[in-house]
Amino acid sequence: MAKSTSGSPAFSKPSGIVRPLVGLYLLLGATTTVMAGPGGPGGPKQGLVDMLIEYLSAKYIGVDLGDDVLYVSVQRQTLFHIQAGQLMASYPISTAAAGLGIRQDSYRTPLGLHRIAACFGSEVPVGGVFEERVFTGQVADSSDIGRDLITSRILWLEGAEPGVNVGPGIDSMQRKIYIHGTTDSQALGRPASKGCIRMSDLDVIELFDRVAAGTAVVILDN
């Protein structure tokens, strides 16, 4: 039922806190959902992807980001999937209604560099409901809209910045910060979650099939 992996490569300790890239909001932020591949779209948006990768490489010297990077723009409420330096797709999301924060029980979305620690739900049907990362056997329907359900797929995030999103009282993994499906797709595009990153059921299934444990996830307030 669940796809769960462990022993994924650890990030080395980064220097400092991730700060937003000036200009990413202006160009990448104007992106709607796109799909790319070999010979896919380039231009200004691709130029900003190149800038993001360069920024992360300079910020996290010695950290192997890998071929896949997920960039979460909080202000734009969009998740961008970058693969081998190309912008592959973007998806509307919801981060926390309470805003940004790292504290346990704050119901806020943490900033900074993370990775996908584990993935759950490879055989779960669209709209399947999880409790503690286990499929309950129930499938959400229209009557569940507005409920804070975790549906379809889970990508469990692990902080990669000690003192920022790793450690007592601020640990993203212990806080159970996920990328997951939601029944409340009408709220996507604006902050609405209790700390997690929500996606539509179909979008999170698509993303789940494209990434794996160990994938870098950077959350920036821009």
Image (cartoon, rainbow, N blue to C red):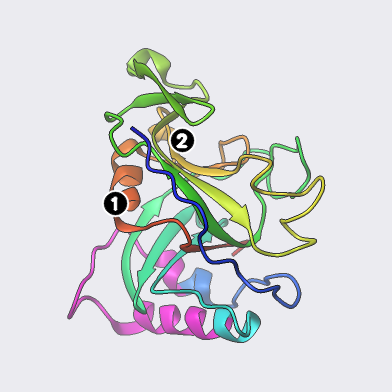
Q: Position of residue 134 (x, y in %)?
A: 45, 27
Residue drawn where x is 41% and y is 62% of the image: 80
Quarter-wise, where is residue 122 in the image?
top left
Q: Which residue is mark 2?
A: 187
The label shown at residue 209 is 1
**Range shown magenta:** 27-55
Q: Say above or below: 205 vs 84.
A: above
Query: Is 3 inside the magenta-drawn segment?
Result: no
Residue drawn where x is 28% and y is 49% of the image: 206
Name the outermost residue toward the front.
7
Query: Is 41 inside the magenta-drawn segment?
Result: yes
Q: Nearer the viewer, mark 1 or mark 2?
A: 1
Disc tally is: 2
Location of the N terminus by quadrant is: top left
Residue drawn where x is 54% and y is 27% of the image: 132
Amino acid type indicated by mark 1: Asp
Quarter-wise, where is residue 218 in the image?
bottom right
Q: Nearer the viewer, residue 208 or 198?
A: 208
Q: Say above or below: 182 vs 36.
A: above
Q: Say above or below: 132 vs 202.
A: above
